[in-house]
Image (spheres, grey):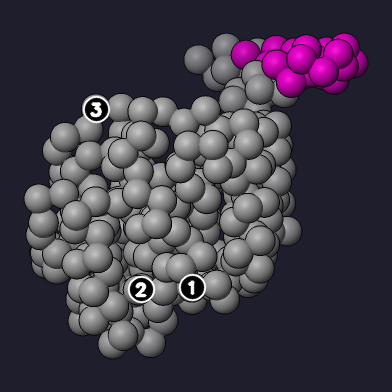
Amino acid sequence: MQETRVFDGDKLRASLFNPGADRLFVTFRQRVAVAGEFEDRGPVRNMTGHGYAHLHIQPRNNDWYINSETKALSRSLKALTKGYADVSAMGFSMGGYAALRFSAALHLKRLIAVSPQYTIAKGAVPHDRRRKEAAAFDAALGDLVRYGRHDVQGVVLFDPFRKMDLNHALYIQAVFSDLQLCRLSCGGHPASQVIREGGSFWDLQTLLRDGPLTAGRVLALHRQRRRLSRTYWQKLARVARQRGRPHLGAAADSGLQRLAAAQEKGQ
């Protein structure tokens, strides 16, 4: 499927696939270990195959989408998306923050934000010992109160055992009151690791597409897949040790042993 470059800056880029559809699905690049280049990205076929256009937005660097091109991108998105009957989005960590930051410009109606940040401004969120990007972050330009669409609906997924992610989620819900908080225990960062390990993100995308999109349905998916997730049992064992819960730790170890035995049997 051919890419249409709808914003082509030096610092930010937006690519559109299947532009003739009347509904739009938006994704955002999350923070990467090695930044400095744009990624090549194709369409999300679970969405384009069901009558959606797909817009992928990305920064060249890990600057949290806040730079000299942010306002120009916002204007471009506002003009682009006003022609769509429905706009939904999904973003992970830095991408989840970006979905919230551009939610008004995108005319966003529904969102799955996975372990998103409220801000990376230094000292703004308790327990957030932010990486070096915080020093250059323009808190005013990145302000979710000013630039977010406060009535966007959807879910914020996070691992409640990660105190920083919990605090960000609480700050976000204070501004975006229609977003439901979904606590995915031992899901990690991003909190969808157990869901991804057990299959793919197709189920989450389908909830966003067909609904109903509720915290309860996402939690049920997490619970369904955690039994066969090594990530879940490993993180649960770590939490049990940290909190002095030997019986819980023993259950986690048993889960890991069961998975190992099943894997050995299947080889």
Q: What segment is highlighted magenta in the picture?
A: 237-260
Going by the image, does 62 lie left or right of 254?
Answer: left
Give the residue pinned by disc 1. 149
Q: Please say if 124 is above or below 172.
A: above
Q: Which quarter of the figure has residue 69?
A: bottom left
Give the residue pinned by disc 2. 106
Give the residue pinned by disc 3. 34
Looking at the rendered image, the quarter that the N terminus falls into is bottom left
Q: Please say if 109 is above or below 120.
A: below
**Mark 1–mark 2 distance (CA, rounded to whole Å):** 9 Å
For the point 65% across and 13% down, which residue is it?
A: 261
Q: Which numbered disc, 1 or 3, marks the residue that appears first in the sequence?
A: 3
Q: Nearer the viewer, residue 49 or 25?
A: 25
Q: Is residue 47 one of those drawn in magenta?
A: no
Q: Which numbered disc, 1 or 2, marks the residue that appears first in the sequence?
A: 2
Q: Secondary structure at mark 3?
A: loop
Q: Which quarter of the figure has residue 36?
A: top left
Q: Are marks 1 and 2 in contact (CB under 8 Å)?
A: yes
The answer to whether one can see residue 179 in this image is no
Residue 168, percent from left and from top: 59, 46
Q: Main secondary structure of the magenta part?
A: helix
